[in-house]
Amino acid sequence: MINWITVESSSIRKVGYNETNNELYVDLGQRQPYCVFSDVSKYAFYHFASAESVEEHFNSHIKPVYDQV
């Protein structure tokens, strides 16, 4: 089950996490349904979801670090 959190960002609508599979889901709105990143810890997800700038954190700490499925 994916637990979604709505975030305040101009390019990211909401983020989700599947604890069973350690997968991070990022809803980018109209560009595509969502991106999925594998092997993301629960800690990394909550740190991302609560970042001051979710978009900046995504570009600096998620995209270059985790594999997109």
Image (cartoon, rainbow, N blue to C red):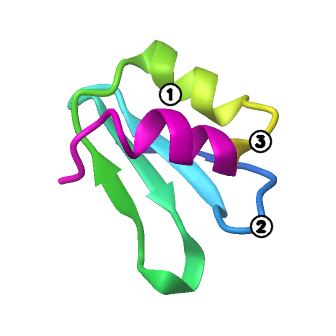
**66 left or right, relative to 44:** left
From mark 1 to mark 2, how far is it between C-alphas? 19 Å
Does label 2 or label 3 sit earlier along the sequence? 2
- SS class, disc 2: loop
- Kindly identify the residue that appears in the image at 42 percent across and 80 percent down: 32
**Three-letter code for the amino acid on which mark 2 is drawn:** Ser
Q: Position of residue 66 (x, y in %)?
A: 29, 36
Q: Nearer the viewer's eye, disc 1 or disc 2?
A: 2
**Which disc, if any, is residue 15?**
none
**57 left or right, relative to 6:** left
Q: Which residues are magenta?
A: 55-69
Seen as rendered, the residue at the extreme bottom is 30
- SS class, disc 3: loop
Does label 1 or label 2 sit earlier along the sequence? 2
**Three-letter code for the amino acid on which mark 3 is drawn:** Ser
Q: According to the image, label 3 marks what residue?
A: 53
**42 left or right, relative to 8:** left
Of residues 38 and 4, which is closer to you in this image? 38
Q: Position of residue 62 (x, y in %)?
A: 44, 38
Q: Nearer the viewer's eye, disc 3 or disc 1?
A: 3
Does label 3 or label 1 sit earlier along the sequence? 1
From mark 2 to mark 3, how far is it between C-alphas? 10 Å
Q: According to the image, label 2 marks what residue?
A: 10
Q: Residues within 10 Å of mark 1 (few under 14, many from 20)?
A: many
Q: According to the image, label 1 marks what residue?
A: 45
- Kindly identify the residue that appears in the image at 33 percent across and 33 percent down: 65
Q: Is residue 58 above or below residue 8?
A: above
Q: Quadrant of the N terminus?
A: top left
Q: Is residue 65 magenta?
A: yes
